Image: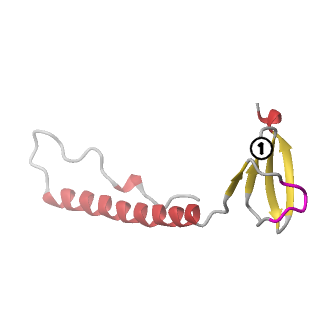
Amino acid sequence: MASNINPTNINILYPVAGQDNDTQGFRTNFSNILSNFSVAKTEITALQAVVDNAPSIVAAVPVGPTSPGTAGQIAYNASHLYVCIAENTWRRTGLSTWS
């Protein structure tokens, strides 16, 4: 997911030390920072919903090619990782291939 936060709309060189800075610059920067925080909140909330609704991970259970399962579930044991690719359809890979 690409972010819609726009860091380029914040003037990092403002305010200038030792200078009478225009208050509009402060207002503009604050408004842009506030807007970016609002976008970040929306994006984080959306990501949290995805994580909360993610399929479960089932540890150390016997899984076969047609064991009960929902697409997206993950199971593992000492030697294999199993991914449910469709309802009651699992694929496995050896854990040693990841080392």
Q: Nearer the viewer, residue 12 or 75?
A: 75
- x 53%, y 67%: residue: 49
- x 14%, y 58%: residue: 23
The spot of residue 8 in percent (x, y) is 40, 52
State yes or no: residue 75 in magenta.
Answer: no
Q: Which quadrant of the figure contains the N terminus?
A: bottom right
State yes or no: residue 65 in magenta.
Answer: yes
The spot of residue 67 in percent (x, y) is 86, 62
Image-based side of 28 in relation to 48, left or right: left
Displayed quadrant of residue 78:
top right
Q: Nearer the viewer, residue 78 or 20?
A: 78
The spot of residue 47 in percent (x, y) is 53, 62
Task: State the predominant SS element of the stretch in magenta.
Answer: loop
The spot of residue 50 in percent (x, y) is 58, 64
**Pointer 1: what residue?**
77
Range of the magenta residues?
63-68
- x 19%, y 56%: residue: 26
Displayed quadrant of residue 39:
bottom left
Q: Nearer the viewer, residue 9 or 93?
A: 93
- Callout 1, which amino acid? Asn
Above or below for 6 versus 79: below
Label 1's element? loop
